[in-house]
């Protein structure tokens, strides 16, 4: 059967183009790969190659013709032995490739039925509750720093595929001493000092994770991870989805995040909102040592890439940690830090320090505050937040990050959409000020949230 | 190939004193079976790509589509040097690499058309395809990002103490990305078994290497990191195989990374939408007529009387049938179910 050669599209948006010239004449033999014609649009030109072999039987569209619609037959190719007679009835000629070519490429690319109905929401993964701590379990006062180190050491003992890499994690014992002692216990095969090369070693970690290892990549601070953000977002976060579930990156990126003290603009930024924007990532930001330990262990075991945001100021703070062989907490579950009935304060990470201090002051004033520590920013435990709002009818969110598109903004939006009728006051979001972190001590203090702001916000939503 | 011949044979400056640096090996002599196998593999890639170009033109393939036509000898020759478990990773001009890794033409084509039978269930497309089973790690759309990733695959090999090698492909364009050199540094420092294969097809999109690169001898791009490199005639599958044998042996012997600059050429535009204004038609035609990798094998097969016209026609037919079957499947296969929107991700 003669084969129709169709006007090709150069891009999914092209509807028509010019047939610039023919490079073969009627009667010429062609083999696959031969350039037979040239077509052009206002932005590109393309050579049309033969995909089959045969003889160019008839040219249907003359050279120089403008405005040729995509998928219009432009020539007829005859197979060996077919005579020119066969061309006489090109109408019966079978189009060579698809039995039913799409009407037009534009439609074809949207061939899928357009989403006329609202698209179903993302199914929520079930998240287990925190494990019960058996009565009589010894509680050990532990710093966040020690808790993080213990979590890594326990997981490295448990699983040979877990290793830690980053700047100064081995011989220096960690820029903030989080990896103290790990080199001594696990050796330099599993505790790997890297050059100062964030983009590079983040990518190396993701590649190792593709191959099935479980890297813990330490950033000396998350400010430096901006150098690596393409590998975190494009390579680590998206691959499980892009590969149709074949492979992902079981990797933890961890390190101090947000403002420390007097380190100024380039070293003082909270990335909670940034990473929480990305599907495919989990984002954890613990406050207490117990949460730091239990959630870091969970993060290391998680098959997804996890951003684990720590805080330098919290590293030295003590909290009780249950003395259990294997204390693992669920990612994606908020913790009610203190029950209350008058107002809900939602916070996370170092933001919790303001919430906790404000609660003490407010208690003196007779306001019974419920504090929710999110612990995980993505997936965010809205169920716990909304249940609390339904009880207290008032919400204040506290974080240190920049105010625009903040985690608090997202929570406020969701609460408005899911619990509007339960709100007795507008949600107030407290964040860092909308300026790069200044160096001067007084200005730095002004740029961060403070306890007074939280107290005032609670008074405002409770109309005191 | 012309470019390789013109330039002085590459001699690595990296460890000049030691005298133990690799030099470009002579093309290996192929057996009849090897010639026929190379012919078949390269032809499959070429016919597949021509078909992909055609389906794109008809609107069945959307988005970006980067064809590998002209460069077939590179992946085909390298593949002949691999052992079980060796990994491969590349950028977005990846169809040839997947076929070389023995991934199914149906699965690749159906991914190009965005159907459920594609390697990524239609969720990845031309630039984002993977096969863990075949050790193909993508398929990456960000220029240069695959280089640290491929280095990480090599890290895993060394960590596990196996003998496998990571083949990390990138182009002359990606060779100017900073993360490439970050990777070179770590790979050399830790002696990782990675072969950096720079497919120099002379154009980064429309920018020629001389307009983009201060050092156009890409085999020397590892010099500061003590990574040796050689230039290889990437249009001659035997030259590629010889380089591949040498490089895999180098890596398996624990000598660390090595760079192979494959001097090759892409006949088609950067992507389907290409202005074709940055090079002359004569240049393209000269490469096609004088250096075509498939024609070279064909000529040798005839020369040695290892195959007749009819023998090759039979292979052509077989290849064409495979491609036609893949194309048919890729058009008939349904689009992914709407529920796939929410799979392979957690919330």
Image: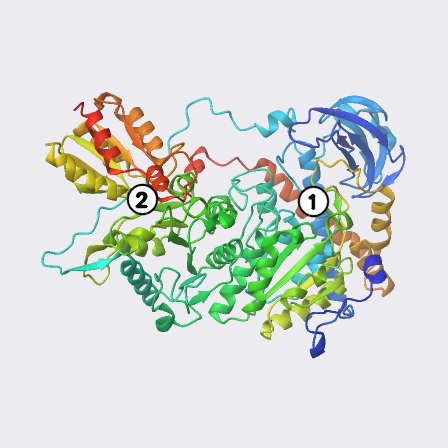
Q: Are marks 2 and 1 on the same chain?
A: no
Whether A461 is drawn above or below B242: the answer is above
Residue marked by disc 1: B67
Residue at x 43%, y 44% (from the top left corner)? A280
**Marks 2 & 1, CB-CB < 8 Å contact:** no
Identify the subunit bearing mark 1: B
Between A268 and B311, which is closer to the camera in this rendering?
A268
Neighbourhood count class around disc 1 (C-alpha, 10 Å): few under 14, some 14–19, many 20 upward: many
Instruction: Answer with left or right where residue A1 lies relative to residue B194.
Output: right
Instruction: Answer with left or right where residue B116 lies relative to residue A171.
Output: right
Q: How is the image coloured?
A: rainbow
Instruction: Determine the image quadrant of residue A185.
Output: bottom left
Instruction: Answer with left or right where residue A325 lies relative to residue B65.
Output: left
Residue B212 at x, y percent in the picture: 73, 48
Q: Nearer the viewer, mark 2 or mark 1?
A: 2
- Residue B102 visible to an observer of this rendering: no
Instruction: Determine the image quadrant of residue A409.
Output: top left
- Residue A421 visible to an observer of this rendering: yes
Residue at x 71%, y 67% (from the top left corner)? B243
Label 2 SS? strand
How much space separates mark 2 and mark 1, taking CA atoms? Answer: 43 Å
Whether B159 is drawn above or below A367: the answer is below
Residue marked by disc 2: A376
Instruction: Answer with left or right where residue A322 lies relative to residue A13.
Output: left
Identify the subunit bearing mark 2: A
Instruction: Determine the image quadrant of residue A378.
Output: top left
Between B43 and A340, which is closer to the camera in this rendering?
A340
Residue A358 at x, y percent in the picture: 20, 38
């Amino acid at each position: 059967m003669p084969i129709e050669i169709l006007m090709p599209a150069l891009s999914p948006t092209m509807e028509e183009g010019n047939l610039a010239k023919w490079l073969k004449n009627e009667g010429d033999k062609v083999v696959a790969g031969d350039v037979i014609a040239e077509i052009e649009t206002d932005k590109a030109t393309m050579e049309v190659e033969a995909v089959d072999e045969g003889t160019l039987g008839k040219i249907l569209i003359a050279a120089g013709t403008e405005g040729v619609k995509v998928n219009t037959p432009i020539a007829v190719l005859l197979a060996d032995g077919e005579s020119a007679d066969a061309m006489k009835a090109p109408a019966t000629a079978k189009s060579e490739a698809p039995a039913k070519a799409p009407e037009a490429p534009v439609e074809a690319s949207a061939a899928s039925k357009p989403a006329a109905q609202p698209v179903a929401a993302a199914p929520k993964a079930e998240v287990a509750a925190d494990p019960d701590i058996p009565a009589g379990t010894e509680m050990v006062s532990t710093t966040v720093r020690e808790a993080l180190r213990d979590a890594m050491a326990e997981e490295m003992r448990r699983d040979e595929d877990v290793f830690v890499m980053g700047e100064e994690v081995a011989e220096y014992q960690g820029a903030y001493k989080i990896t103290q002692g790990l080199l001594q216990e696990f050796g330099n095969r599993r505790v790997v000092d890297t050059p100062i090369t964030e983009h590079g070693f983040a990518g190396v970690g993701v590649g190792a994770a593709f191959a099935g290892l479980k890297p813990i990549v330490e950033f000396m601070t998350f400010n430096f991870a901006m150098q690596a953000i393409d590998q975190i977002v494009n390579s680590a976060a998206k691959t499980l989805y892009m590969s149709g579930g074949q492979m992902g990156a079981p990797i933890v990126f961890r390190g101090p995040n947000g403002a420390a003290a007097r380190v100024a603009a380039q070293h003082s930024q909270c990335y909670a909102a940034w990473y929480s924007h990305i599907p495919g990532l989990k984002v954890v930001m613990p406050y207490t040592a117990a949460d730091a330990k239990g959630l870091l262990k969970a993060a290391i075991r998680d098959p997804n890439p996890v951003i684990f945001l720590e805080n330098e100021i919290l590293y030295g703070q003590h909290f009780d940690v249950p003395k259990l062989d294997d204390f693992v907490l669920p990612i994606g579950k908020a913790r009610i830090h203190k029950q209350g009935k008058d107002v809900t304060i939602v916070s996370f990470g170092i933001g919790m320090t303001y919430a906790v201090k404000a609660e003490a002051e407010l208690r003196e004033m007779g306001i019974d505050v419920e504090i929710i520590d999110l612990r995980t920013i993505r997936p965010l435990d809205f169920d716990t937040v909304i249940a609390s709002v339904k009880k207290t009818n008032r919400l204040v969110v506290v974080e240190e990050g920049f105010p625009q598109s903040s985690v608090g903004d997202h929570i406020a939006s969701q609460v408005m959409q899911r619990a509007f009728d339960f709100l007795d006051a507008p949600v107030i979001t407290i964040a860092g000020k909308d300026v790069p972190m200044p160096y001067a001590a007084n200005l730095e203090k002004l740029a961060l949230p403070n306890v007074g702001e939280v107290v005032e916000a609670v008074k405002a939503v409770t109309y005191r | 190939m012309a470019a390789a011949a013109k330039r002085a044979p590459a001699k690595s400056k990296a460890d000049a004193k030691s005298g133990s640096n690799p030099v470009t090996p002579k093309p290996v002599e192929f057996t009849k079976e090897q010639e026929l196998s190379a012919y078949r593999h390269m032809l499959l890639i070429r016919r597949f790509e021509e078909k992909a170009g055609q389906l794109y033109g008809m609107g069945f393939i959307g988005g970006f589509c980067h064809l590998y036509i002209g460069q077939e000898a590179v992946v085909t020759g390298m593949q002949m040097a691999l052992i079980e478990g060796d990994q491969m990773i590349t950028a977005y001009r990846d169809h040839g690499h997947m076929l070389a890794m023995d991934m199914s033409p149906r699965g690749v084509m159906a991914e190009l058309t965005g159907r459920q039978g594609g390697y990524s269930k239609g969720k990845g497309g031309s630039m984002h395809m993977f096969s863990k089973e075949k050790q193909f790690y993508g398929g990456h759309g960000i220029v240069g990002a695959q280089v640290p990733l491929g280095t990480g695959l090599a890290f895993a090999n060394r960590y596990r103490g196996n003998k496998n090698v990571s083949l990390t492909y990138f182009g002359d364009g990606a060779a100017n990305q900073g993360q490439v050199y970050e990777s070179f540094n770590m790979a050399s420092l830790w002696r990782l078994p990675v072969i950096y294969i720079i497919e120099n097809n002379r154009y980064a999109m429309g920018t020629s290497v001389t307009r983009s690169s201060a050092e156009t001898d890409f085999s020397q791009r590892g010099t500061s990191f003590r990574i040796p490199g050689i230039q290889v005639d990437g249009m001659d599958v035997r030259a590629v195989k010889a380089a591949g044998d040498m490089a895999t042996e180098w890596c398996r012997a624990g000598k660390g990374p090595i760079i192979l600059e494959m001097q090759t050429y892409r006949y088609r535009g950067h992507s389907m939408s290409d202005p074709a204004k940055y090079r002359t038609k004569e240049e393209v035609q000269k490469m096609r007529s004088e250096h075509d990798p498939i024609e070279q094998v064909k000529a040798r097969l005839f020369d040695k009387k290892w195959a007749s016209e009819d023998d090759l026609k039979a292979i052509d037919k077989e290849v064409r049938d495979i491609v036609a079957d893949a194309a048919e499947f890729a058009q008939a296969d349904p689009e992914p179910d709407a529920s796939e929107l929410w799979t392979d991700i957690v919330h």
